[in-house]
Image (cartoon, grey):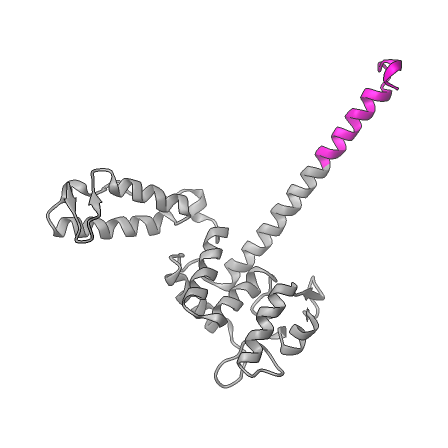
Amino acid sequence: MIFSPIKKEIADDTLSQWQESLRQYGYSAKMINGFVATANFYLAYIGHREYQLLDPLLSNDEERQGLTRSEYLRLLKSAREKGKEKEYLQVKSFGVLGLTTRELPNMTVDAITNGRIPLGETDRSEVEIPAWLQIELSNFADRNGYQTGPLFRNRNGDDLNRTTLTRLIRRLSKDAYVSEDKGNPQCIRQLYQSTGAKMADDITDQVDRTLEQLMEQEQFEIGWNAPFEAI
């Protein structure tokens, strides 16, 4: 058994336990394998290969899916910790409001003040901004001296294009240990859509179960073979 300078003990199962804790926290198999590979390199360097973990995690169906909820929250947490307020609010614009990059310029100071973002000729004519997000957006506009026009703009005052938005979020994804393939506006918006769809399905299932229970109770009370005393 060996010890690091900060008195942390390394045992035969240290890396395997670390691997499992990372998996439970929501890291992808690809990223976990990268972390373990770094640890293996260090152990080889100090002459303790016996503590290496040589069995990588295999990518599964979840690995090939889009951005997960835990990864989305890590993006927000990383942006907040590093003081990247603009990126923080951009991620929320896609993840909370479900905006596309084409619709993002519609998030103007006036729209934030009104609490509604007009979207024009789309499947949604407008989107309502939750009160708590409206406060965050208004505070950002005030601190940057924005009194009119789009909330997100470059140094010249022009709208941010898709390439710039993707680059900003990908930089953030590195800090948040999220795959760069998922660090883009489209994947964040897809999470918004899939979350809403799942909640709708859950509500439908709950309604179906409640209706079934109601009809079973009615059958018990007035079914053809129900005892008269139950009526």
Q: Quadrant of the N terminus?
A: top left
Given the current orientation, which residue lies at the most extreme left position?
47
Task: Tell me which segment is drawn in magenta.
Answer: 208-231
* Majority SS type along the magenta span: helix
- Residue visible at 58% across and 51% down? 194
Where residue 8 appears, as percent x and y from the top left, is 22, 48
- Percent coordinates x, y for residue 171 in the rendering: 39, 67
In this picture, residue 47 sits left or right of residue 190: left
Q: Which residue occupies the foreground of this view, 2 or 112? A: 2
Residue, far bottom: 156
Q: Can residue 18 be seen in this snapshot?
A: yes
Q: State the residue at coordinates (34%, 41%).
A: 20
Q: Is residue 170 above or below residue 197?
A: below
In front of the other: 198 or 148: 148
Q: Which corner quadrant of the image does residue 24 belong to?
A: top left
Please name the residue shown 82% across and 22% down the image. 219
Q: Is residue 222 left or right of residue 197?
A: right
Q: Does any portion of residue 102 appear in the rendered image?
A: no
